[in-house]
Image (spheres, rainbow, N blue to C red):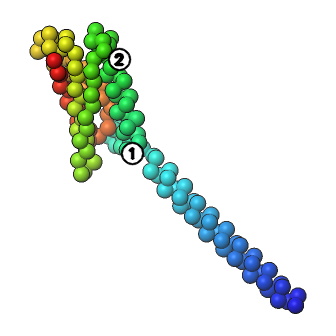
Amino acid sequence: MTGRMYERNVRRGVRKEAVFVLFTVFMILSLWFFISEKVMSQNNGTVTVDEAAFLELESNYLSQVKVYLEEEGFRNSGVALSRVIETDGSRSYEITLHHKKLNELSLEEQEQLKADIEELAFGVSGCEFQVTFLG
């Protein structure tokens, strides 16, 4: 009986070790996968990011635009951000601004304001920005 018990204990030990090794390999592969998904790659001075990071960038951009408009004297401006995501991953953004004073600006002032707002945009490759005014 002691021989059988010994064999059983050895088999249990081997099974436990096998389960531990498989679990460890699974955890390492999972960790590698999640880390590689979060890492941002640098490409010609621009950054490629995942969807959650885009949402954060978009939110920050809207905040910056609102602060900029307030500093320029357009308090309580309406600011809307629309995006189109193409199948290749590129994105087009339209920033629509609403304030009664915007239509009072000359064409040169409007173009300068649009350029300033587009300069606030995040520098991710494949993203285009366009600013439009509503009266």
In the image, what residue type sits under mark 2? Val
Say which amino acid is labelled 1: Asp
Residue 128 image point, x, y percent: 23, 36
Give residue 47's quadrant in the image.
Answer: top left
- Res. 91 in view: yes
- Quadrant of the image containing the N terminus: bottom right
User: Residue at left 22%, top 15%?
Assistant: 99
Q: Say what secondary structure mark 2 lies in.
A: helix
Give the answer, above or below, for where 93 lies relative to 3: above
The residue carrying mark 1 is 50
Q: Quadrant of residue 117?
A: top left
Residue indicated by mark 2:
67
Q: Quadrant of residue 110?
A: top left
Q: Is residue 109 at all visible to an observer of this figure?
A: no
Q: Please state the horizontal and vertical placement of residue 38, each as a whole percent of the image.
A: 46, 47
Q: Residue 97 carries which label?
A: none
| Residue ID at (59%, 65%) | 25
**From the viewer's perspective, is 113 left or right of 10?**
left
Decide if residue 44 is on the left or right side of residue 96.
Answer: right
The residue positioned 67% from the left and 68% from the top of the image is 20
Residue 7 lies left or right of residue 55; in this view the side is right
